[in-house]
Image (cartoon, helix red, strand yellow):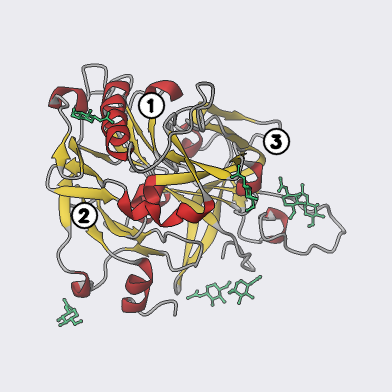
Amino acid sequence: PVGTPPQNVSMVIDTGSELSWLRCNRSSPGTNPTQNPNKFDPTRSSSYSPIPCSSATCRTRTRDFLIPASCDSDNLCHATLSYADASSSEGNLASEIFHIGSSNISGLVFGCMGFVSGSDPEEDNKTTGLLGMNRGSLSFISQMGFPKFSYCISGSSDLSGVLLLGDANFSWLGPLNYTPLIQISTPLPYFDRVAYTVQLTGIKVDGKLLPIPESVLRPDHTGAGQTMVDSGTQFTFLLGPVYTALRDEFLNRTSGILPVYEDPDFVFQGAMDLCYRIRPALTGIFRRLPTVTLVFEGAEMAVYDEPLLYRVPHLAVGNDSVYCFTFGNSDLLGIEAYVIGHHHQQNMWIEFDLERSRIGLARIQCDVSSQRLGIGS
Ligand SMILES: *[C@@H]1O[C@H](CO)[C@@H](O)[C@H](O)[C@H]1NC(C)=O
Ligand SMILES: *[C@@H]1O[C@H](CO)[C@@H](O)[C@H](O)[C@H]1NC(C)=O
Ligand SMILES: *[C@@H]1O[C@H](CO)[C@@H](O)[C@H](O)[C@H]1NC(C)=O
Ligand SMILES: *[C@@H]1O[C@H](CO)[C@@H](O)[C@H](O)[C@H]1NC(C)=O
Ligand SMILES: *[C@@H]1O[C@H](CO)[C@@H](O)[C@H](O)[C@H]1NC(C)=O
Ligand SMILES: *[C@@H]1O[C@H](CO)[C@@H](O)[C@H](O)[C@H]1NC(C)=O
Ligand SMILES: *[C@@H]1O[C@H](CO)[C@@H](O)[C@H](O)[C@H]1NC(C)=O
């Protein structure tokens, strides 16, 4: 809930961006407003406070801002945000009360966006906005000053996912495997210094390490080649040479199991070009697929079974469905980084420990974790 009186909002948790924002819809004066669950109406909140462009907050530079924030005709701070997937939004910076658990946090800076252009309007419509969780000064987590947060992203829409702000006793979880966050103090053109960057050291397919030189997995002198844990991106993207090595090995090991979808012009979401035809009766096939393991310093992330393939919506070949391998080629997207998306973070407990500059991982079913934390059913 946000504002006074509180309005319910739903927000996408995005570890890859900084400024939180809500889709705002000002009701016209004199009308009897009813809440649209996917919009926040600032005119109905007595605690809503737009930020003037004379404020220092308006001069904050973040990577989300396409251009520095500017002054609108009412002398309010106007921001335009843009993301790697070409979506964007535009509106005013403001501060509000966010009601989190039993506390009311006032003065939280967010963007009240009048214009939102997403890559998937149907999907965007399901939420009111975005919760910026990276390490930049305007992010939700920085403004709140939490030393750590954790989440579990459930594999289905059964609402068993968990976002935990701060710490809790999770001795039931067993020890987490930690990998350090990588920091580079000098600004480099391609390096996002407020992202959650980890060091990928290799990729295994059914336990066999792909022959990838470690140097291609490290950021170069321009900052290109960092590995980001980004809950705001769906799939996982690897730089060209690494993607090709993984694709070749996966293809080799699935050759007797699944027929490839041979259409040279088809590339799913612009970056995923290894797709298969699957007959309706063949859905149990997922368990026979090889396991892909992302290896980090000190921790691993194994991807197996259903999350390896994603069904292309609205595409069929005869009676077959088309499924694509859920790793894509960063080069085809024009991004200079390895990005670990939320699809591969499903059913893992992931702790972002800002205080000790590390990320902890453990495999768990989210419904188990929500039961142990005493939330949900
Ligand atoms: C917000 O959601 C809670 C829990 O679902 C519900 O009890 C409450 O009535 C909702 N409030 C508004 C203003 O819709
Ligand atoms: C804004 O909210 C009003 C109700 O308060 C609704 O009638 C109108 O359609 C909404 N506008 C948009 C663009 O969603
Ligand atoms: C928090 O805000 C809600 C809604 O405005 C109010 O009912 C509640 O009393 C507030 N709680 C505290 C601790 O201020
Ligand atoms: C978004 O939601 C609104 C209101 O619920 C609906 O009228 C509109 O058709 C939806 N748009 C899309 C693209 O789903
Ligand atoms: C955590 O919970 C376990 C039981 O679930 C208990 O034995 C342990 O003492 C607790 N640890 C802390 C630090 O509270
Ligand atoms: C898979 O790789 C092995 C070892 O390089 C090779 O001998 C085999 O022919 C390949 N199989 C296919 C179907 O490409
Ligand atoms: C598709 O399925 C229908 C109904 O099960 C069947 O009659 C038909 O032969 C199938 N077509 C192909 C190309 O397999």
Element class at badge 1: helix
Element class at badge 2: strand
Q: CA distance from mark 3 to mark 2?
A: 46 Å
Instruction: List x then y, in percent, for residue 48.
Output: 62, 55
Residue sitting at x 65%, y 34%:
75
Residue projecting furthest to the right: 30
- Residue type at the position of mark 3: Asp
Nearest to viewer (mark 3 / mark 2): 2
Q: Mark 2 near ligand 5 (CB under 8 Å)?
A: no
Q: Nearer the viewer, residue 224 or 5?
A: 224
Which residue is labeled 1 in the image?
330
- In the picture provided, is 338 more to the left or to the right than 361? right
- Residue type at the position of mark 2: Gly
Which residue is labeled 3 in the image?
74
Q: Are marks 1 and 2 in contact (CB under 8 Å)?
A: no
Q: Is residue 318 above or below residue 167?
A: above
- Residue type at the position of mark 1: Ser
Q: Earlier in the sequence, mark 3 or mark 2?
A: 3
Q: CA distance from mark 1 to mark 2?
A: 25 Å
Q: Is residue 370 above or below residue 121?
A: below
Instruction: List x then y, in percent, for residue 224.
Output: 29, 22
Q: Earlier in the sequence, mark 1 or mark 3?
A: 3
Observer able to see residue 316:
yes
* Mark sitting on residue 360: 2
Nearest to viewer (mark 1 / mark 2): 1
Residue sitting at x 21%, y 19%:
220
Residue sitting at x 38%, y 56%:
144
Mark 1, other Cα within 10 Å: few <14 / some 14–19 / many ≥20? many
